[in-house]
Image (tube, grey):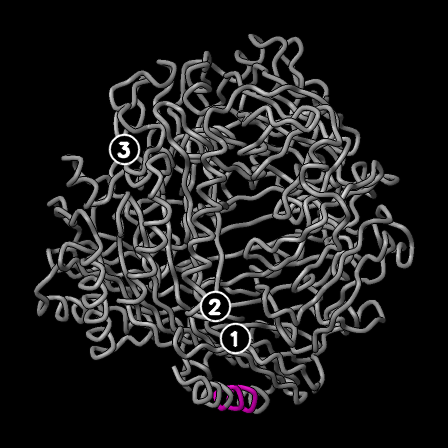
């Protein structure tokens, strides 16, 4: 039985002493110095057509160094985790800051003082998933692919993929952060390609959580992942195209999550706000229907191991819950300590870096809309001449709030039921206009973007979700 | 960085990796190692935000054992860690599924590309980087209507060595300066969509001129989008920039040429070799040795020599593209571009831009596409960002909230009209503007 955790124990032993080692280095520094030790172990297995196309394991270890000197940030990183290399990296970062200070117009005024974490956080699934035999994980992937391929004669290729990222991160700063967190992000994905005559298409399902095996496979998307993928790809073979135009729609939780993240969340990241996003100057303004309350939280109240869970951010700021929109009014931006100082508010725990060689940026964690008062069935019964849109595809948005999302499929709603199915669905609109058009919010809740990665020059593991939401937006389609 | 010393160091490390893996029980081994040294200046929040540097190595290996494969990667050359990585790869292989078609590239001779390695660029100081950053931002912000969300200049120097237990060994090295900018035009309440461009130079001396050219191009793109009005919905022609031709036309067509997709039944072109698959005026080539383009290389990632080749000639499919594995499986030969062409050329047509714009009563010319392109079906749908609207060849102006959708294969049936000049836009291609027909355009 294979246990990939065995060799990993050596790293953990080393990491136990790492915090005090880094604390000791930081104590000797004059400027603000922040050290981030990252140890990421990523394992991935993918099966396709009876083959194992991927069986891989990657370990990346290093220290990222950030120095605030001469009113400017300097950054450096090293994969050599010894005192001399780290001190050399600190010096390089300081020299870079000194040079850039000659060009920077407005110096960094300060970092917001706040309580910084000294916790040692061990996520529940970390040890158990590490201890689980990889052969068992591989078997699940191989069997899933086989079963999916056998579900319909129309399916010509099935794919199944599992991945896990064990993150061990220690953050130490010269003003008091000294914390460690160990988390595992696990993901499971299925794809099916189907053909009928000359017609050929594909669809997929994906689930991602912060947590171990049980957490991953207790997620609602996991429950019938094989059947749902197979049924959807076969149904899509006979689905029609929509005609384009403005439509009333009900968005599923995954698309509500995409709306929260792409169309709203990015516009309220304080660095984007400072660069002139649509949210600039709108704090306190009614930007959405009073039915809409939208949060970002590293430690949200809804269960299910959201994919962006973090107890504290990469500056060591403990995470809480940030009400971005409260009953339709724009209430807060997302901050790191620098932007919080400039805006005169508390930091929101949103400073994050993907790897040791990345600089921390303001990033979302888990972004969601609070559930409302209606059941999903009540929404369907109340919705005529309306489309139900399901399954988030890719999404992009401008700082202007203009967004575009792909969706797996759409259905006409007739007499409170799903009717005709449509394929190749894309949605667009201006985020605040769409949120202002919201007239019904369901009381369901689901995280549904945990398998996704947010891109902002570097990846970040995030999640998003919410209830079903009825609103008006543009549907891309055929003329 | 001393590239020859680094190459020697990495080469020795790979000898050790291959030797140890074979001793540990592997039947065959592929390994690669790289060293990268970079420095970067970021502009964010309307000011120079940070300056930084990174230096690191990477080692990755794939072992074959009893016709099963396992792969690992680490970011150290530490012998103990290398030994652990080998063990892990072997253990992964043990639990994998046997596959008789696994294989490695054989020993080969490669074209000597004389890759540029500009020592001045490699040794650039942070002070010189700062001067170039000021040049970039000065050029951009000379117009008060330009708002830059983020911009950066990055110098990167690196060496890569790949080798396998069949005697294949290849290396390349390079240094480059890359710059990028993302921003929007703002004039009072009038805000354009975001746009983005990037470019690069292999030589420090040539960088300032290219940087200023990028800033002028970017400013023009953004300012041309100010004052956007409502467009009109129609079905008909859309004029694509070279970048959009690559994204919406060429990349999806290449999907159907890949041996990996053919063997898995995902390609429409399995039976189409030497048959007409596109209009006669479409010729797509791979020129992997063009040093002016990103992506140029004498060998593929697995060590197969690259070569110039016609992929689609006058509308006729000339090649399927195979890796060592897909070639073994399909009974063909590896083409050195199993993942797709390294530097894509599309042969130009005869129309200048004005003529292309005048060919239609009503025409949308997007700058960027934010949407979905499904290569399997050929369906595409999304928002056409930064679009200009033309009627009978006369510019009406910028338009907002436009969506385009259609099907690539139906569009090919309608025919293509190609521009007379090709552009690279700092990318891995040389492509002209192309006029597509049969596209649904919806005004929001």
In this rendering, the label closer to the viewer, 3 or 1 = 3
Q: Of residues A130 and B54, which is closer to you in this image?
A: B54
Quarter placement of the C terminus of chain B: top right
Same-chain status of marks 2 and 1: no
Residue located at (70% from left, 80% from top): B105
Asked if disc 2 and disc 3 are in contact, CB closer than 8 Å, the reply is no
Is B264 in the magenta?
A: no
Q: Residues within 10 Å of mark 3 (few under 14, many from 20)?
A: many
Mark 2 to mark 3 CA distance (whole Å): 35 Å
Element type at mark 2: strand
Asked if B23 appears above or below A349 in the picture, the reply is below
Q: Are marks 2 and 1 in contact (CB under 8 Å)?
A: yes
Q: Is residue A104 left or right of residue A298?
A: left
Query: Callout 2 environment at 10 Å: few (<14), some (14 to 19), or many (20+)?
Result: many
Corner quadrant of residue B129: bottom left
Q: Bounds of the magenta span?
A: B12-19
Position of A419 compared to A471: left or right?
right
- Same chain check for tags 2 and 3: yes
Real-space Cα distance between discs 2 and 1?
Answer: 8 Å
Q: Secondary structure at mark 3?
A: loop
Q: Which residue is mark 3?
A: A333
Please give the residue where the numbered disc 1 appears in the rendered image. B60
Q: Residue at x 48, y 49 (%)?
A: B197
> Which secondary structure lies at badge 1?
strand
Specify the subunit that label 2 lies on: A
Q: Is residue A420 above or below residue B408?
A: above
């Amino acid at each position: 039985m294979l246990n990939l955790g065995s060799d990993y124990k050596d790293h953990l032993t080393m990491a136990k002493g790492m915090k005090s080692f880094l604390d000791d280095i930081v104590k000797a520094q004059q400027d603000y110095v922040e050290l981030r030790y990252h140890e990421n172990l990523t394992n991935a297995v993918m099966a396709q057509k009876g083959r194992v196309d991927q069986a891989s394991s990657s370990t990346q270890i290093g220290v990222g160094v950030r120095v605030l000197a001469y009113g400017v940030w300097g950054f450096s990183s090293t994969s050599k985790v010894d005192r001399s290399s780290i001190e050399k990296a600190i010096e390089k970062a300081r020299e870079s800051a000194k040079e850039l200070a000659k060009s920077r117009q407005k110096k960094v005024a300060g970092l917001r003082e706040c309580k910084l974490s000294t916790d040692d956080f061990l996520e529940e699934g970390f040890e158990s998933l590490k201890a689980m035999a990889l052969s068992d994980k591989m078997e699940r992937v191989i069997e899933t692919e086989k079963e999916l391929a056998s579900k319909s004669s129309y399916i010509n290729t099935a794919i199944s993929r599992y991945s896990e990222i064990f993150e061990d991160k220690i953050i130490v700063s010269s003003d008091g952060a000294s914390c460690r967190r160990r988390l595992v992000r696990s993901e499971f994905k299925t794809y099916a390609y189907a053909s009928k005559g000359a017609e050929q298409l594909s669809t997929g399902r994906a689930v991602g959580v912060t947590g171990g095996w049980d957490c991953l496979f207790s997620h609602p998307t996991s429950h019938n992942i094989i059947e749902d993928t197979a049924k959807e790809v076969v149904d899509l073979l006979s689905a029609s195209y929509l005609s384009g135009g403005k439509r009333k729609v009900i968005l599923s939780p995954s698309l509500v999550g995409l709306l929260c993240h792409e169309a709203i969340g990015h516009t309220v990241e304080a660095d984007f706000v400072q660069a002139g996003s649509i949210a600039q100057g709108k704090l306190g303004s009614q930007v959405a229907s009073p039915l809409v309350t939208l949060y970002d939280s590293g430690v949200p109240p809804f269960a299910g191991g959201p994919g962006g869970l973090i107890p504290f951010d990469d500056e060591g700021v403990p995470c809480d819950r940030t009400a971005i929109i409260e009953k339709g009014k724009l209430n807060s931006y997302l901050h790191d300590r620098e932007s919080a100082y400039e805006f005169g508010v508390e930091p929101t725990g949103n400073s994050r870096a993907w790897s040791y060689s990345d600089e921390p940026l303001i990033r979302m964690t888990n972004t969601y809309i609070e559930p409302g008062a209606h059941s999903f069935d009540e929404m369907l019964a109340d919705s005529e001449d309306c489309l139900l849109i399901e399954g988030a595809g890719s999404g992009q948005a401008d700082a202007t709030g203009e967004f575009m999302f792909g969706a797996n499929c759409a259905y006409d709603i007739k007499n409170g039921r799903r009717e005709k199915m449509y394929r190749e669905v894309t949605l667009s609109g201006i985020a605040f206009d769409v949120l202002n058009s919201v007239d019904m919010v369901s009381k369901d809740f689901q995280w549904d973007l945990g398998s996704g990665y947010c891109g902002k020059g570097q990846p970040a593991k995030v999640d998003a979700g919410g209830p079903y939401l009825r609103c008006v937006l543009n549907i891309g389609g055929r003329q | 960085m001393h590239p020859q010393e680094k190459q020697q160091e990495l080469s020795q490390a790979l000898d050790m990796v291959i030797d140890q893996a074979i001793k540990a029980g592997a039947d065959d081994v592929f390994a690669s190692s790289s060293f990268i040294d970079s420095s970067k200046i970021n502009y964010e929040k309307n000011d120079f935000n940070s300056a930084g540097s990174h230096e690191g190595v990477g080692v990755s290996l794939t072992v074959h054992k009893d016709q099963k494969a396992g792969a690992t990667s680490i970011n150290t050359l530490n012998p103990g860690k290398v030994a652990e990585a080998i063990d892990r790869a072997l253990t992964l292989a043990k639990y994998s599924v046997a596959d008789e078609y696994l294989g490695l590239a054989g020993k080969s001779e490669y074209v000597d590309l004389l890759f540029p390695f500009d020592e001045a660029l490699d040794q650039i100081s942070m002070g010189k980087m700062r001067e170039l950053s000021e040049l970039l931002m000065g050029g951009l912000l000379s117009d008060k209507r330009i708002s830059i969300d983020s911009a950066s200049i990055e110098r990167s120097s690196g060496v890569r060595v790949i080798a396998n237990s069949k005697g294949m060994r290849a290396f390349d090295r390079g240094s480059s300066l890359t710059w990028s900018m993302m921003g929007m035009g703002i004039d009072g309440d009038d805000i354009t969509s975001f746009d983005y461009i990037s470019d690069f130079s292999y030589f420090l001396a040539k960088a300032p001129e290219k940087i200023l050219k990028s800033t002028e191009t970017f400013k023009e793109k953004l300012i041309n989008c100010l004052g956007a009005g409502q467009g009109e919905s129609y079905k008909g022609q859309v004029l694509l920039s070279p970048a959009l031709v690559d994204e919406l036309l060429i990349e999806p067509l290449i999907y159907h040429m890949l041996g990996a997709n053919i063997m898995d039944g995902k390609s429409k072109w399995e039976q189409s070799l030497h048959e007409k698959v596109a209009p006669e005026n479409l010729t797509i080539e791979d020129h992997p040795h063009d040093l002016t383009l990103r992506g140029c290389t004498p060998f593929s990632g697995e060590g197969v020599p690259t070569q110039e080749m016609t992929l689609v000639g006058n509308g006729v499919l000339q090649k399927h593209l195979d890796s060592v594995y897909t070639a073994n499986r399909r009974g063909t030969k590896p083409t050195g571009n199993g993942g797709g062409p390294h530097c894509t050329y599309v042969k130009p047509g005869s129309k200048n831009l004005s003529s292309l714009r005048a060919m239609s009563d009503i025409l949308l010319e997007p700058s960027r596409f934010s949407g979905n392109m499904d290569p399997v079906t050929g369906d595409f749908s999304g928002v056409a960002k930064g679009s200009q609207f033309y009627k009978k060849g006369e510019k009406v102006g910028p338009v907002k909230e436009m969506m385009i959708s259609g099907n690539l294969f139906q569009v090919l049936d309608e025919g293509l009209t190609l521009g007379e000049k090709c552009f690279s836009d700092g990318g891995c291609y040389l492509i002209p503007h192309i006029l597509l027909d049969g596209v649904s355009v919806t005004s929001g």
